[in-house]
Amino acid sequence: MSLRFDTTANEWVRSSYSGSSGGQCVEWAPAHASATGVVPVRDSKTPTGPVLHLPATAFATFVTGIKHGTI
């Protein structure tokens, strides 16, 4: 199994929870998530850097935590 992930093969969307000042910017690939059930997440400042792959349920829990200020 390859651990490489083609970051150019996906359309990345900046999270609405990312700051507009360019500091903390998180992006995710919704089409890949819909197709596979795995949500790729990356730092927009390093688009060719590492990608975190989260199961959709874990990503949903993460987003809920952000919304409620617990994360």
Image (cartoon, grey):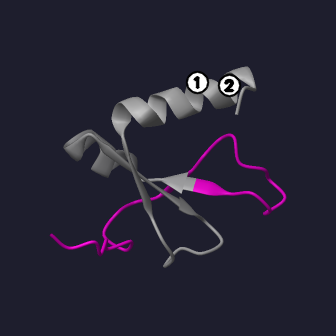
Give the left or right position of residue 9, taking residue 21 as reference.
left
Residue position for label 2: 67
The percent coordinates of residue 35 (x first, y second) are 21, 44
- Furthest-left residue in this view: 1
- State the SS at label 2: helix
Give the left or right position of residue 71, taking residue 40 as reference.
right
Residue position for label 1: 64
Cα separation between marks 1 and 2: 5 Å
Give the left or right position of residue 49, taking residue 7 as reference.
right
Q: Residue sitting at 29 percent across and 51 percent down?
A: 32
- Furthest-bottom residue in this view: 48
The percent coordinates of residue 38 (x first, y second) are 30, 45
**What is the number of the mark on residue 2?**
none
Q: Amino acid at mark 2?
A: Lys
Q: Residue sitting at 30 percent across and 69 percent down?
A: 9
Within the magenta stretch, is there residue 15? yes
- Furthest-top residue in this view: 68
The percent coordinates of residue 23 (x first, y second) are 80, 62
First to last magenta residue range = 1-26
